[in-house]
Image (spheres, rainbow, N blue to C red):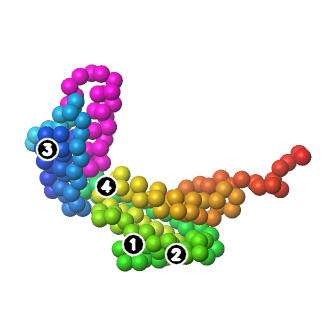
Amino acid sequence: MAAPKGIDVKVDGQSVTIKGPKGTLTNSFDSALKVAVKDGVITVTRSSDEKNVRALHGLTRATINNMVIGVTQGYQKTLEIVGVGYRAAQAGKGISLQVGFSRPIEVTAPAGVDLKVEGQNRIHITGPDKQAVGLWAAKIRRIRPPDLYKGKGIRYAREEVHLKPGKGGKKGA
């Protein structure tokens, strides 16, 4: 894959460091693979044609591609809060969630992941590392997942929650 202009790629043994306008990402890869950079093109070659090495080859190529996209464009996940009285507020670099517990829940993300609240019911998680952004979105969603009967809770944007009918929903009884 060709690295875009403005991206600095360094390979040190099994470690790959990619530096761009959105940040710097470093990742280590299996010794069965060799990563090389020549004339702005990043290549991944494998030592054998075994099934697990072929799988690692695809994983490594996709991970490096995600790193390049992350340092150039970045990644974003959006969460929505649904429910009467449920809301989020910006609290410094973190957020404060009021989602039906007796006290607000404070969430502070690590360096490299930004949490922003839009209005009172949308949370944007952004950062260059796709894995960290997805992990923090899942951690925040896990605080109050969508209720299957009422639909209240924290969900991903455009996530469809299929509601169960409840006790009165039985037909033919």
Q: Position of residue 77 (x, y in %)?
A: 42, 59
- As for residue 55 lying within the magenta part, the answer is yes
Label 3: which secondary element: strand
Q: Work out which residue is located at the far right of the displayed protein and give it.
A: 173
- Give the alpha-carbon distance from disc 4 to disc 1, as whole Å: 18 Å
Circles 3, 1 touching at the beta carbon (< 8 Å): no
Q: Work out which residue is located at the far front of the displayed protein and give it.
A: 102
Mark 2, residues whose alpha carbon is within 10 Å: few (<14), some, or many (≥20)?
Answer: some
Residue position marked by numbered label 3 in the rendering: 11
- Give the alpha-carbon distance from disc 2 to disc 1, as whole Å: 13 Å
Marks 3, 1: nearer the viewer: 1
66 lies above or below 47: below
- Give the alpha-carbon distance from disc 2 to disc 3, as whole Å: 45 Å
Quarter that holds the N terminus: top left
Mark 1, residues whose alpha carbon is within 10 Å: few (<14), some, or many (≥20)?
Answer: some
Name which residue type carries label 4.
Answer: Asp
Report the span colored magenta: 45-68
- Give the alpha-carbon distance from disc 3 to disc 4, as whole Å: 18 Å
Residue position marked by numbered label 4 in the rendering: 129
- Give the alpha-carbon distance from disc 3 to disc 1, as whole Å: 34 Å
Q: Can you see residue 117?
A: no
Q: Which image quadrant for residue 83?
A: bottom right
Residue position marked by numbered label 1 in the rendering: 94
Label 4: which secondary element: loop
Looking at the rendered structure, the number of numbered marks drawn on it comes to: 4
Name which residue type carries label 1.
Answer: Gly
Q: Which image quadrant for residue 15?
A: top left
Q: Position of residue 78 (x, y in %)?
A: 45, 62
Mark 4, residues whose alpha carbon is within 10 Å: few (<14), some, or many (≥20)?
Answer: many
Mark 3, residues whose alpha carbon is within 10 Å: few (<14), some, or many (≥20)?
Answer: some
